[in-house]
Image (tube, rainbow, N blue to C red):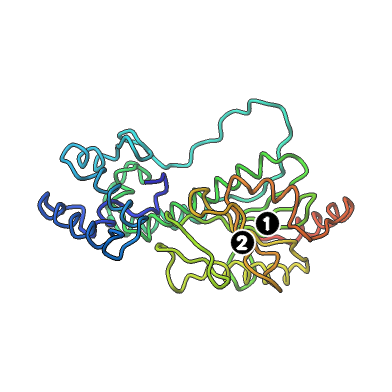
Amino acid sequence: MSTSPAERTPYEVLGVAGSASEDDLRRAYRRRARETHPDTGGSAAAFDEVQRAWELVGTIEARASYDRGSSSTSSPAEPGATWSAAPRPPRQDSRPKARTYGHPGGRARERYLAMLREWVGRGVDIPDPYEARLVRTAPPEIRRELAKALAEEATARQITDLGMGFTMWSDVAAGNEGALDHVVLGPAGLFAIASEDWGGQIVLKRGELQGENIGPLELPVRRTTRTARAFAKDLRVKFTGVLIVVPDNSMEDGIVAVGRGRHASTLVVQRSLLGHVLRTGIPGMAHGSLSDVFELRSVLQAGIRFL
């Protein structure tokens, strides 16, 4: 199990409610093990996921530890652990950071809190809405909003550390198409960036991202490129590339080009490689001059609106 709130819980993997009896849990495990075993038409990945789920809740002791929000194999790993937005630790060096504007992850956290309060019930006190035990019991669509916020915050931290040659605007309006998670300007050009975390493995098929936790109508590539076009049209700018940033463990390849033609500059990028792409640019795409960067920054700073 990864550290993502969006990842399926062991109960969801086994197909039972969190309140299932020990006997029901055991029967569910045996059924899912048969269904997912490679010898009976399943896949190794699905079978491994079932075994991993059973390790977390298959014994009374392990299940009690998991239900408390604690586990030696998942994170946060201590009772009372939380996914709250922690303040950035004090800087350990004097190197200049990127210019940053906006509140990365802010809207996703607001959506998470609103959905969580509606699910828990009005008038119910929630001492810590990010406490691991509470988050794990929430429906998948609520956990997904928290994972989205964490993904945006992680991307913003990486971009901030790239240095003073970069400028980042987060959660910016894009006409009638909603918002872009990040707009980043640097020596290699102007990039529209979406930060995502579906809590599971993803693959690129026929120019679109697919995965067990990606809804059939979600279409993240189409949505991101459409939003980027709306933003570019409103501000009369041109993006060098559109990047969809995902956790490192969510796909096999570190950088995947979406396609050719108008999608040639759209990439799916593992988060640890984001800095490399922003520094070096997209292969085959020319870099602008330093004066172009200064002029474009002024246009963006004057025209960007935050949501």
Crowding near pointer 2: few (<14 within 10 Å), some, many (20+)?
Answer: many
Q: Residue 158 appears at what percent x and percent y?
A: 62, 43
Disc number placed over residue 281 in the picture, else none = none
Viewer-side residue, 44 vs 222: 44
Of all residues, the one furthest to the front in this rendering is 39
Q: Amino acid at mark 2?
A: Leu
For image coordinates 38% across by 61% down, the residue present is 141
Q: Nearer the viewer, residue 159 or 243?
A: 243
From the image, tell me which residue sits under label 2: 180
The picture places residue 157, in percent across and down from the top left corner, at 60, 42
Q: Are marks 1 and 2 in contact (CB under 8 Å)?
A: yes
Q: Is residue 152 above or below residue 41?
A: above
Answer left or right for 60 relative to 78.
left
Q: Residues within 10 Å of mark 1 (few under 14, many from 20)?
A: many
**Element type at mark 2:** strand
Q: Where, quadrant-wise, is the C terminus in this rendering? A: bottom right
Q: Which residue is mark 1?
A: 183
Residue 253 locus on image (x, y percent): 57, 54
Marks 1 and 2, how far apart at CA: 7 Å
